[in-house]
Amino acid sequence: MRNHKIEYYDNAFDFLQMVLKIKRKSIDQIFDDYLSQEYYFSQIHEKLSILENKSIQPNRLGNIKGKILYSIVKSSMPTNIIETGVATGYSTSIILMALKKNNYGLLNSIDYPNYQSILEKILRDINYKGLTCTFLTFDGLKSVAGYILKSNYYHISKGEKSGWVIPTELKGRWDLHIGLSEKLLLNVINKLGSIELFFHDSDHSKRNMLFEFDTIWPHLKESGIIVSDDINLNNAFKEFCNKNIFKRAAIYNGSLGVIIK
């Protein structure tokens, strides 16, 4: 049965039971499995403390949403996952932990790095947006001014790259693509052929979210899954659901959305 209806949940167990159609006991087991990943989490948090000690709070999923993402990957056993938005690599690590536990599946990530270095940010924009867009447009000059005024806003410390907190042992199932999703997403999709899981956590503008959802949807396998964080920032997720027919859709705590095709 397919519909347009979105379910709303504040309880992670109820949310996952509806989305994954599995029993509470199975969810308990997956959550225990998530907590058993302390070896990797200790490495991740040790690196994140570099930012936190500078009073910089890196963007990352909270503990409950991390458990939900891990549960979806662990339970659905996807062959190919695409993620947009890597930053430090916290969410990426969670996905890779589940893939390692499954001993199956690959993750392709697209990231537009938010470097600490202002020069690296400008060179990034020139490389991926072009010199004209960077310096000869209002938006381009506004971005450069923002880099200067908000020099303490970044995810990637000097000398590091996208996903710098990801434990080395997890990277065997990971392929990283640097650039804008609007330019890279379709190429990555065509390279993989079919997708079982898509995780949006990049630019949360309505325009970009709708672009990513609309682009991935035709290539998502039957019963494939879209997961999107920060859907509370605009109505892109709800608008997408309203114009498409799907098996199930749910929102957890107002901010994490999931659609089952």
Image (spheres, rainbow, N blue to C red):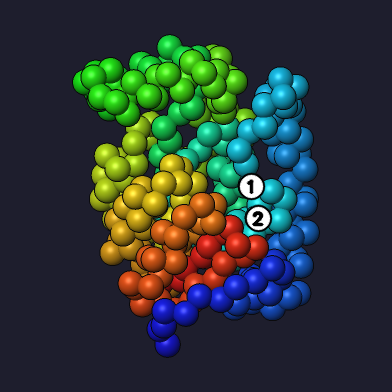
User: Within the image, what quadrant is residue 193 found in?
Assistant: bottom left
The residue at the far top in this view is 119
User: Within the image, what quadrant is residue 221 found in?
Assistant: bottom left
Q: Quadrant of the C terminus?
A: bottom left
Where residue 5 sits: x, y (%)?
47, 79
**Residue 101 is at least partly visible in this image:** no
Q: Amino acid at mark 2?
A: Lys
Where residue 187 sits: x, y (%)?
26, 44
Question: Residue 110 shows which numbered tag?
Answer: none
Distance between the alpha carbons at the discs numbered 1 and 2 = 6 Å
Q: Are marks 1 and 2 in contact (CB under 8 Å)?
A: yes
Residue on which disc 1 sits: 61
The residue at the point 34 percent across, 50 percent down is: 207
Say if 134 sits above or below 17 in the image.
Answer: above
Question: Residue 65 shows which numbered tag?
Answer: 2
Say if 165 sits above or below 218 in the image.
Answer: above
Say if 102 sits above or below 38 in the image.
Answer: below
| Horizontal arrangement in the rendering, residue 169 relative to residue 33 (left or right) | left
Where residue 247 sits: x, y (%)?
44, 79
Circle 1 crowding by C-alpha within 10 Å: few under 14, some 14–19, many from 20: some
* Label 2 residue SS: helix
| Horizontal arrangement in the rendering, residue 6 relative to residue 108 (left or right) | right
